[in-house]
Image (cartoon, grey):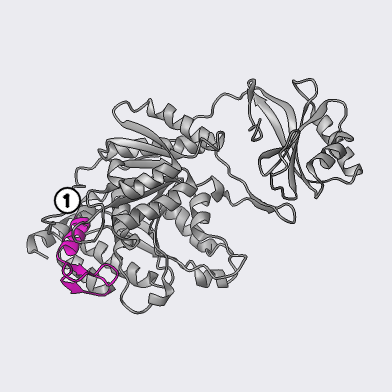
């Protein structure tokens, strides 16, 4: 390292106060890549006070179903910053996803995954690719609410909330504005899931109106995925619900060059977590061959979050110069481009040697003048709507034919409600169903207020009493409401 750079770092280190950070070495390759990353961060002048915790496989085995102990939780609450290596989740049931647990428990609603090409030094078909995937982190199908309801049918509930949509979408626009990005794209499947994904799309349009200087577009997720894989250059910042974001961010990372190079930040009001997106790779553990780049780059994101922009810039540029010089680990080594194959420690040493240098062909990082970290904004609650009960969907386990089931149910209806339709996996099969429709043993039976307006919850209870007396096996109910007179439930296919 040049003496002038070293002296500048010594002066700045002496004048800065170390920031407490919780660090988890993780499992598999985790300890090796964490050690390598911390050595680079320290050499670049990062001011961190490290509090190390154990998470992952050993903690799972000790009886903590989420892979994290109470003492570790306390450290996370105290520091509010988590630098985390990948972990191994034991095989078999009973073990919760640690990442999901941490993200949801600490309210880390925004997952940020930058994906940019490093051509020609890392092979890619998309040398101009430079996009950021911003993924909602707390809800959607990742709520993990699942049930087996019949012999044949299982369900997973997709939960989308208006506050959840607004938080992540507004964060995406704030990220774009803070980082000089030109466009924010929204991916959903609201042509099918008109209420859940439809809400995400509507909130996107509403929030976009507050950012007139940023271009926007919306894509249906299937064609969006195809375009992302084929022409990623057309996207800049992309925001989407949890499951889509999980899948497409990995695709984007891989087509940019390698999942192994990709960092990730998880941001919330009360804390942040920084990690590589790859797993713990147990077969590579202890062999000094793993690439620390994903975790190291997550460390750069952490330093930016902490306002240590100069150290972050030094690391990113030294890392780019190392890649540019062809010093590569085995996962990205390529004859004719790479100049030296190195292991985990030697790669970190190469980055440290280049601190103070800048890349010559790759675009260098300029963080020193970056804006302050984005502060998440909690959305305001909308005014309560007038909520009116207008019907109920009763889900029934039965092997009867649609007509026979309808006859049984109509014998139980009385008073305020009447059977309107029966569907099977969302397809209307009564009345006027088609004989070709394949049916399982799980039926949605819709009863609506006979008056066409409202019904009482007492009427719902009475209906269930009559169904129970008739020996009809109902497994679930969903009340049907109107909100300020607007229907709050989907119609059956064919209606």
Residue 335 coordinates in the image, percent (x, y):
19, 71
> Image quadrant for the C terminus?
top right
Q: Residue furthest front?
A: 436
Residue 490 coordinates in the image, percent (x, y):
63, 33
For disc 1, the marked residue is 363
In terms of image quadrants, where is residue 63?
Answer: bottom right
From the viewer's perspective, tell me whether residue 236 is left or right of residue 350.
right
The magenta-colored residue range is 314-343
Q: Which of 471 and 264 is in front in this view?
A: 471
* Above or below, comparing residue 375 to residue 253 in the picture: above
Q: What element carries label 1?
A: loop
Q: Which residue lies furthest to the bottom in this view?
A: 287
Residue 336 is a magenta residue:
yes
Q: Nearer the viewer, residue 10 or 309?
A: 309
Q: In this orientation, does residue 18 appear?
A: no
Q: Nearer the viewer, residue 86 or 422?
A: 422
> Image quadrant for the N terminus?
bottom left
Q: Residue at position x 31%, y 31% from top?
A: 215
Total labels drawn: 1
* Above or below, comparing residue 436 to residue 321 in the picture: above
Mark 1 is surrounded, within 10 Å at the Cα level, by few (under 14), some (14 to 19) or many (20 or more) other residues, namely: few
Q: In this orientation, does residue 402 appear?
A: yes
From the viewer's perspective, tell me whether residue 266 is left or right of residue 396.
left
From the viewer's perspective, tell me whether residue 329 is left or right of residue 430.
left
From the viewer's perspective, tell me whether residue 397 is left or right of residue 171.
right
Residue 1 is a magenta residue:
no
* Above or below, comparing residue 477 to residue 331 in the picture: above
Residue 315 coordinates in the image, percent (x, y):
22, 58
């Amino acid at each position: 390292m040049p003496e002038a750079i070293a002296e500048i770092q010594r002066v700045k280190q002496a004048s800065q106060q170390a920031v407490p950070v919780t660090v988890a070495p993780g499992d598999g390759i985790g300890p090796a890549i964490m050690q390598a990353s911390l050595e680079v961060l320290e050499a670049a002048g990062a001011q961190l006070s490290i509090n190390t915790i154990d998470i992952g496989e050993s903690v799972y085995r000790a009886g903590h179903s989420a892979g994290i102990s109470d003492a570790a939780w306390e450290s996370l609450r105290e520091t509010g910053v988590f630098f985390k290596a990948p972990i191994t989740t034991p095989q078999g049931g009973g073990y919760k996803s640690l990442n999901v647990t941490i993200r949801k428990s600490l309210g880390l609603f925004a997952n940020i995954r930058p994906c940019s090409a490093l051509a020609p030094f890392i092979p890619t078909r998309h040398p101009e690719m430079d996009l950021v995937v911003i993924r909602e982190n707390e809800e959607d199908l990742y709520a993990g609410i699942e049930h087996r309801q019949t012999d044949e049918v299982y369900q997973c509930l997709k939960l989308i909330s208006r506050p959840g949509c607004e938080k992540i979408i507004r964060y995406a626009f704030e990220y774009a504005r803070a980082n000089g990005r030109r466009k924010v794209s929204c991916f959903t499947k609201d042509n099918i899931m008109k209420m859940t994904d439809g809400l995400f799309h509507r909130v996107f349009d509403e929030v976009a109106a507050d950012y007139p200087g940023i271009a926007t577009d919306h894509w249906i997720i299937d064609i969006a995925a195809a375009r992302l894989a084929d022409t990623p250059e057309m996207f800049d910042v992309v925001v989407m619900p949890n499951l889509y974001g999980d899948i497409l961010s990995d695709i984007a990372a891989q087509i940019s060059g390698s999942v192994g190079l990709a960092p990730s930040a998880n941001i919330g009001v009360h804390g942040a977590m920084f990690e590589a997106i790859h797993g713990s790779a147990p077969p590579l553990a202890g062999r000094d061959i793993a690439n620390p780049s994903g975790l190291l780059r997550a460390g750069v994101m952490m330093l930016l979050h902490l306002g240590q922009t100069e150290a972050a810039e030094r690391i990113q540029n030294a890392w780019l110069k190392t890649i540019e010089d062809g010093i590569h680990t085995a996962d990205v080594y390529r004859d004719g481009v790479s100049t030296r194959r190195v292991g985990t420690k030697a790669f970190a040493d190469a980055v440290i040697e280049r601190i103070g240098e800048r890349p010559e062909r790759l675009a260098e990082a300029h963080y020193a003048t970056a804006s302050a970290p984005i502060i998440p904004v909690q959305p305001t609650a909308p005014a309560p709507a007038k909520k009116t009960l207008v019907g109920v969907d009763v889900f029934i386990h039965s092997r009867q034919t649609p007509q026979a089931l309808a006859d049984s149910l109509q014998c139980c209806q009385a008073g305020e409600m009447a059977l309107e339709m029966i569907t099977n996996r969302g397809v209307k099969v009564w009345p006027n169903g088609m004989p070709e429709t394949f049916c399982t043993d799980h039926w949605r039976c819709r009863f609506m207020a006979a008056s066409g307006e409202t019904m009482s919850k007492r009427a719902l209870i009475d209906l269930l009493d009559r169904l129970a007396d008739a020996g009809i096996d109902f497994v679930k109910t969903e009340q049907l409401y109107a909100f300020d007179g607007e229907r709050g439930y989907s119609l059956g296919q064919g209606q």
